[in-house]
Structures are given as C-alpha cells and as structure tokens.
Amino acid sequence: MEERVPDRFTALTADLGLCYGGDYNPEQWDTVRRADFPDLGAADGPDTGRGSATVWKEDAFLMREAGVNLVTVGVFSWARYEPSPGIRDFDWLEEVLDLLHEHGVAVDLATPTASPPAWLGREFPETLPVDADGVRLVAGSRNHFSPASQVYRDHALDITRDLVERFGEHPAVRMWHVGNEFGQVCHGEESAERFRGWLRARYGSIGALNDAWGTAVWSQHYDDFAEIVPPRRMPYHVNPAQHLDWRRYGSDLLRDLYREQLAVIREYDDARPVTTNFMGFFPLVDAWSWAADLDVVADDTYPDPADPHAPADTALVRDLMRSLRGGEPWFLMESATSAVSWRPHNLPKSPERSRLESLQAVARGADGVCFFQWRASRAGAERFHSAMLPHAGPETMVHQGVRRLGADLARLRPVAGGRVPARVAMLWDWPSWWAATEPALPTGRLDPLDQLRRWYRVLWRDGVAVDLVRPGTWLDGYDVVLVPNLFLMEPTTADRLRDVVARGGSLVVGPFTGVVDGDAQVRTGRFPALLSGVLGVSGEEWAPLPDDGVRLSGGHRAEILGERLRADDADVLVSFAEGHLAGSPAVTRRVVDAAGAAPAPGNGRTPGGGTASYLGCVPDDALLATVLRDAVGRAGVGGVVPELRELNATRRTGTEVEAVQRGDALFLLNHSGADGAPGEPAHVVVPGSWTDLLTGESVTGEVTVAPGGAVVLVEKGR
Ligand code: GAL
C-alpha cells in the first residue's frame, strides 16, 4: 500500500471548489460530419467543417456555461489510443485537453483499461474472461478482460504508462481515474492458478486449508493445492468456505489491478489525486480493504426514480462512501440526470429530483458531483441513457437543470471539506455479507443489506447521523452501535462491541449475528457465542417463520426468521405469541448497572449504564423503530433538527424531509413533490438566525422548504 498524501484531493477542491461535471467521451464524436449537426452553433469559434472539432468546441463552451469544472475523459478510449497492437494515437486527446483547459475545465483522466481493444482478445484469447460455466466471453460489449490474465495486465500497464507519460504534465489533468467500476470475475485456468497462490499465502499448508474449509464433509479433502479449482459449475452446493475465499480472492485480485496502475501513475505524478469508482454496496469488491489505496473515495449511484425508498437508501450509500476513509470528503463520480437505459423500464427523473440527489451527496460529504455522461451518445448500447446535454441540445429541461445545479454547487463552495459528525455507528462487512448469502442457510430471505437498509431508514427519518464502520474497528466516539446482521464475526469485533456497553453506550444486535467464524464454520454452543454475555441472552434454534410471519406480544409481528432464546440476564420486552416459538423471547434488553461504568464514549456525560438490546427475530417496522429509538434516546443522541421525527411521521415513504449537518451547514431536503407529483411544503423549526447559502436569504426560527426543494443554512455570525 502506498503512503498516503492526505491533501491531494483537498488541494484540488481548494482550487476548484466543489467539482462538477461528468464523463466526457469525445471520441464518440470524432468521426461525425459537420452536416450531421445542423443545429450546432453555440460554440464560440468558426465552423471548421470537421464535425468533431465543432462538437468538441460546443461541448467546452457549454460546459463552461453550465458551471462544469471537471470532466472524466478517456474511460473507454483504449481502442482509439491503440487501434492496432503497439500503435499510439494520442494527438486527438491533446486537442481535447487543450480545448478543455482553455475553457477552464479540469480533467480527471482515466486509464482506459476497462475495455480492451478487440485485437487483444483475438490475438490473446486468454485475456478474455471465462464464466462459471466455462464459457469464454467475447468482445463486443465492454469489460471483456480477465483480471487474472498477465497478458491483459501487461498491455494495460503499457497503455497506462504511455498515457501518463504523455499527459502527466498537461495542465488540464488534475486527477487520475483508474479503470472503471472494478467488478470482473474469471473462472479460467490462469485465474485458478492465481487463486491457488492466494490460498497458499493465506493458509501456508494444505492441511490448514482442509481444516478451514472443513473438507472432511462430503469427501472434499485436498492432497495438494493443485487440486483446487475455482467454484465453477458443480453438481451441488459449493463448499461455503471455498466460496468465501473465492470472493475474498476476487476482491484482492481486482485491487492488485488497481494498485499496479496506480503505481505507474505515481512514477510520473505524485501530486494529483488518484481514484476509481465504486458502486455502492457492490458485492464483488470489499471497499473497506480498498479505500486506503484511493486518494479520494468515488462512487457511482443510480437511484431508481420508481423506488420510494430511494432517498433513504441512497443516503445510506452516501454515508458508506464518507465512512470508507473515516469521514473524509468523497466524490459522486456518476449518476444520471434523468433516466438510465439499463433497467427494463426506465423512468425519467425531474431536474428537481436530480438536484436533490446531488445536494444529498454534498450534504453527506461529497466534494464532487458528476454524471454519466456529458453529451448523450447517439450510437451504442447507451444511446437512450440521459446525459447533461441531451440529444435535443441545451434548450431542454434537463440541460437547464444542469445549469441550475452548476450555479448551486458554486454557491456551496464554503461547505467543501466539511465533516458530518455522527454518534451512531452501523457495522457493515463484505465477507459477512458474502457468507450470509450462500445457499443452504436456514433461510435465503435474510439479506444483510435489506436489514441494514431497514435499520438505517429509521434513523434517516429522524435526522440522526450515522457512520458505517468496518467490524473490528475501534468504536470510541460512538454512543450507539447498531449491528443489524453480522453473520460472520471475529472475536475482536465482539470485544469492541462489549466495550461500547461497558462505557455506557447503547448496542443493538439483530438476529443471526455472530453465527460463524472467519472460515464460515458455525460457532458451537448457545448463540450468539461471542455476544451472549453482553446481551444477557442466548439461543439454541433458528426458526424461519411462515410466509405471512407470526404474531408477537404487544400487537407486533415478526417475519423471515425467529430464534428460540433464553433471557439469561436481560429483560424480555416482546415475546413470540404464536407458532413454533410461542412464549420465547423475541426482543430483549440488558441495562448494565451504572456502578463502575465509564463515561459514555462521545457525549462525556455520566451514563446510567450501557444497554445491550437483542432482536431474536426480524421485527415489523414499528417495533424496529421502537427498539432503535430507545437505544438512541438512552445514549442521549438526537436528530440534527428538533421535531423532524414528528414532521416525517405525517409523510409518506419517499416524501420525507431529510436533515444533515455538514460542517457549519445544515442541509434540509424536501423529497416530496420532486417528480411533478403534488408536494407538501415542510415547515421546519430551526432555532437561531441563519442564512441560506443557496439563495442568500435570512431565516429565523423556522424555515419553509418547498416541495422538491432544499435549503442549506449556516448560522449567522459563524
Ligand atoms: C456505469 C458506467 C458508465 C455508464 C453508466 C450508465 O455503470 O460506469 O460507463 O455505463 O453506468 O448508467
């Protein structure tokens, strides 16, 4: 891992302010004829007759008009740079970079390695990926490379080196973007060989691997690493430990690709930030283990306009991105101005919705907001994907929205670098997610991500800030720690959780947590083995529930999974009222004696003792909210705005008011009515005197946020 220079990205935003722009694919216009564009004319230059020059000029001109200050160039340009083996054609890029620079638009220059030229696969078929069925995939789409292929990697490094050598000093280039959305898998022989190497390094001996994988089951014993193959198509379930290691290996392999391109960039440029774009809770990359190698975390998120949970679920992704590097500013690298083209049915988005989503990213720590892509493609698989500049040109609703957002982001310059303070932590872990989504579990319906989202939505509606935390990390500074589902748990994680309660904080643990160890082997004894002491409860049976759930005491319901529990040293708050688990505790709480408890981690007050709550079921929304609010309240944590909970209690899902404090700025986003539907204004109590950064208007005591609107308040005199 390279040594981190902390200010590479800060230096960029100190100069540009919040970054604003999108992917720019100028090569798509390289061969156009001028005559194809009768409407071009906004460009401030003579008509050269060459279509590309005119289009590029218009692009640069319109970018400047829209407040765009940074675009990502060259993500898919490899075949254009290297049309045949060894040839280099970079001159056109120089023309583009010069033009952008003249117009004050900085460039995030990509290594073009996500999509190799067709000749590479033709000449070296081993560079093409093989799927789990043994089918070798072909060129004609994108991402047609095997991350394990040495030939691919050598070619990728060659083109990267030549690109960086040629443009490393170009004044337009201010940031580097390695590849695109790493997430490729290959089950072929070269990948198998690398997997074996990875396993050798992890286990040292084949005996240790046999123990870890539990190969005594089903006669899976290995005598030699050479016998091990990737989890290709098999007659029945794959060994869960083998699959877990395959996932770990896959993420590490992709990170190696990232790292080796990063190293080439660093040979020529040690000053500018380097990143790559994550995809939120994407299953193939353990982003915790990558984040230290990025100067700034970047993310691509495409909220579905048809999903009423999108505002909350997208906020969760934003918080993950902020948390990956301990709260540092991050970068929204891609989203859509309106419709995408890859869902079966692609609803458009209003400019208000797009603006709200962008401001939400900034509220939650982003110092860059970019879209895919600047100019809508007229050819290829994404010709119906929205863009900043639609096919119909600048006099369009979408483009006017883009201009407005550019102006908004310029006004929000003062928030750059600001931190989002959070006293609540939620644990999230990729290996646990992987292990929990294997087949052959008690239920295939308990998805850790679904549960994380459900828990998060309660806090989001109340305006309570949350950080995501990698299990095992120190939890000092958090008063409340939530573990919706952590199927795989290491002892260090349990130690950290016990500390929280010992210090007077609140811990809430969800069902089917701490079930297996790092090798996906069940921790025997009453469960959750590592936590039953601190929770004061222990269990003996996992019992998936009937499709329509079961009744609990107090009029509540549970679904998906219940557990047969015994309250050893905890109060039973809710029990199962019917079915297989009738009479068994469903929700418990252990309040630790205040005597001897240390002050709570973040708030410094003398605690009344920590609390440890356990959910032995998947509770209905109301019960979940009660349990979480109890934990948050007992720890003395509140939302950033008084009465937000009451306000949101009257609003439908997807139309809530979102409140986030970032640095000195209080963001209030009214999600109702952002799509043309009749919306509700929100009257929000904000004690004190404020200025709205977006309008310059003064606010005292209460502010009205228009439907689909936003205010960003800073206190007067600060
Ligand atoms: C992303 C990708 C972009 C574009 C976009 C469309 O996954 O990085 O290149 O394809 O999706 O939504």
Image (spheres, rainbow, N blue to C red):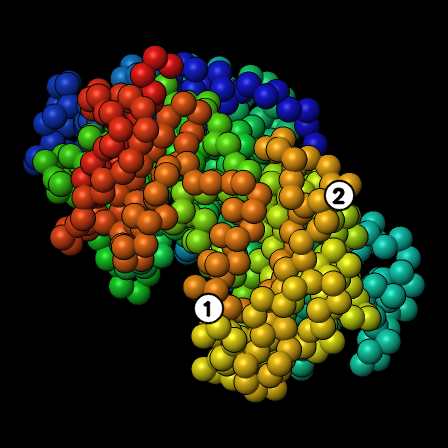
Q: Kindly identify the residue that appears in the image at 56 percent across and 28 percent down.
A: 295
Identify whether 140 is placed above or below 114.
below
Q: Nearer the viewer, residue 76 or 120?
A: 76
In this view of the protein, can residue 107 be seen by the observer? no
Q: Amino acid at mark 2?
A: Ala
**Quarter-of-image position of residue 561:** bottom right
Mark 2 packing: few (<14 Cα in 10 Å), some, or many (20+)?
Answer: few
Residue at the image position 61 percent from the left and 55 percent from the top? 508
The secondary element bearing badge 1 is classed as loop
Quadrant of the drawing holding the N terminus: top right
Residue 134, numbered circle: none
Callout 1 amino acid: Asp
Residue at position x 78%, y 70% from top? 526
Name the residue at 61% across, 39% down. Answer: 478
Assess whether mark 2 and mark 1 are in contact (beta carbons under 8 angstroms): no
Rendered image quadrant of residue 342 = bottom left
Residue receiving disc 1 = 620
In the rendering, which numbered label is found on residue 595?
2
The crowd level at tag 1 (other Cα within 10 Å; few <14, some 14-19, many 20+) is: some
Please identify the quadrant where the C terminus is shown.
top left
Residue 351 at x, y = what percent?
A: 20, 42
> Would you place residue 87 above or below residue 340 in this image?
above
Front residue (pair 76, 488): 488
Relative to 136, is 29 on the left or the right?
left
Mark 1 vs 2, N-terminal side: 2
On the rendered structure, is 411 left or right of 464?
Answer: left
Gap between marks 1 and 2 measured at Cα: 35 Å
Q: Position of residue 363 (x, y in %)?
A: 38, 34
SS label for mark 2:
loop
